[in-house]
Amino acid sequence: MKFLKVTAAVGAAGLLGLACFLWVTAPARTPDDLWQGLGEPNVENGERVFSAGGCSSCHAAPGAGDDGRLVLAGGAPLASPFGTFHAPNISPHPEAGIGGWSLHEFGDAMLRGVGRQGEHLYPSFPYASYARMTPSDINDLFGYLKTLPASDNVAPAHELPFPFNQRALLGGWKFLYLNDDPRVAIANADAKVERGQYLVEGPGHCGECHTPRDALGGLKADLWLAGGPNPEGGPGRVPNITPGGLDGWSESDIAYYLESGFTPDYDSVGGSMTAVQKNMARLPAEDRDAIAAYLKAIPAH
Amino acid sequence: MKLKTIAAAAIVAVLGAGAVVAADEPQAARQQMMKDVGRAMGALAGIAKGEKPYDADVVKASLTTMSEVSKTFADQFPAGSETGFETEASPKIWENMDDFRAKDAQFGKDVDTALATLPADQAGVGAALGTIGKNCSACHETYRLKK
C-alpha cells in the first residue's frame, strides 16, 4: 500500500514536472506588431540577405548545381549526431512550399524556430543564429523568395531515432540555446565591424559550423568560431576562423578569400565551404570587407 | 669510436633512404604538384590584383606549370595511396575516379586555352584566373578533405 502511494506521488510529481516543462518551453510566436509597418519588401536587399544566408546551399535539390540553385525544392540531407535531417521545400509553391505562408509565420520560423502549425522546428534550421536578424531583412528576404520558381517536390521526413523525434524536447533546447544576444562583445566596434557582426552572427550563421558543439548540440559559447570536428561527422575538421586560427591573414586576405576562394598561399576553398564562398562572392564588396573586419576583431582562440 | 661512426653513418643512410622513399610516394608527389600550382596561381593573382607588374614570361611560365601538372595529376592516385603522408585526398576520389579524371582534364583544358592565346595584360590575366580558378574549388569541393 505504501509502495502504491509512493509510486502515485512520484508519478504525480513527474506529470506536474512534465506539464511545467511543456508550459515553460511551449513554442512562442513573435508579437504581431513586429511585422507591422515594414512596407513593400525591397527585393534587391532580399537577394543580398539570401546570399548572406546561403539558403540555397541546403534548400536547393541535392546536386542542383549552379543552374538549379534558385529552385528551393528541398530534400538535401544534413547528417548530425542526432540523425539525418532533410531540408524542406521553401519555394513559393502554395502546398509543397511556403507560398501560402504569411510574413508573420515566416518570421516566427526565422526568429523563434516555430513552424506554421505552431510546432517547434529543429535547430538544423539555424534559427538560433537568424534570431539576430532584423524584421526588415526578413521582410525583404520573404519578398525575394516569392520571386523564385515554385517546386511541387515534397522533401523526405527527418530520419531521427527516439527520443530526438519528440519535438516537445526542442523547447528545452531553445530554453538553453536560443537567444538574440551578441555572441561576443566587441569594445568600440565601428559601423563596419557592427555590420560584419550582424552578417556573421545573424544571417551568415557562420558559427553553426565554425563553433564546436556540446553533447546536446548547442554551440559552446566560449569557443566562438574556434573551429572543431565536422558537425556532419566523418573525417575533416572545420577551421578556427578567430584571429588565432587566421594567423597571418590580413583583413584583405579574408575578403579576397570570400571573393575568389583563394587562401593567402593560393590553396583553394574546398568541401562545404565552396558553396558558402560562392554565395559570399555574390555580396557587395563592402559586406565581405565587413565580415573580414569583424573576424579580426573577435577574441582569438 | 669506429663503431659509433658506423652507427651514425647507418642512421644517416636509413634516414636518407626514407626521405627518398617519401618523395617517391604518390601522396608526396601529388602534394608537391598542388604546391606548384598554388605558387603559379599566386604569381598570376599578383598580376591580376595589380600587386606585380604584368610580365609575359611569368604568365607563360605559370600557365605552363599548371598545364604540365594537369596532364599527370590524376595518375598520382593509384590504389594503395588512399591514406598516409598526411594526405587530404577524399575517399570519394577512388569511388568516382572517372569524374575525378574529368575534372582534372577540364582544368587542363582551361589552362591550355589561356596558354594558347596568352593573356596580354592585367585584365586578361584576371579573366583567365577567374576561369581557371573555378576548377580548383570545383574539385576541392568534393575530393579534398579538411579545409
Image (cartoon, coloured by chain):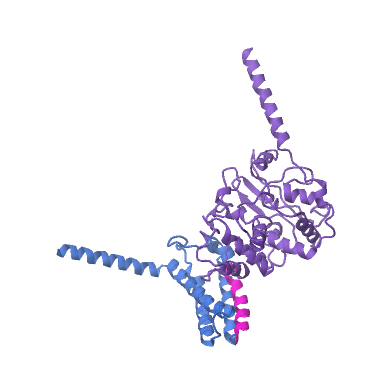
Chain colours: A purple, B blue
Instruction: Name the residue at 41% across, 67% down.
Output: B25
Q: Which residues are magenta?
A: B120-139
Tell me: residue B135, above or below residue B113: above
Visible in this render: residue A275? Answer: no
Residue at the left extreme of this rendering: B1
Tell me: residue A64, above or below residue B53: above
Tell me: residue A159, above or below residue B29: above
Q: Position of residue A12 (x, y in %)?
A: 69, 23
Near-viewer residue (A295 or A266): A295
A88 left or right of A163?
right
Is most of the magenta stretch helix, strand or loop?
A: helix
B79 left or right of A121?
left
Residue at the front extreme of this rendering: A188
Residue A285 falls within the magenta-colored stretch: no
Near-viewer residue (A12 or A153): A12
Tell me: residue A160, above or below residue A49: above
Locate residue A10: give its quadrant. top right
Q: Position of residue A181 (x, y in %)?
A: 66, 49
Tell me how many marks there are.
Answer: 0
Visible in this render: residue B68? Answer: yes
Q: Position of residue B60 (x, y in %)?
A: 53, 85
Q: Position of residue A65 (x, y in %)?
A: 68, 65
A230 left or right of A120?
left
Q: Quadrant of the N terminus of chain A?
A: top right
Residue at the top extreme of this rendering: A1
Locate residue B44: give its quadrant. bottom right
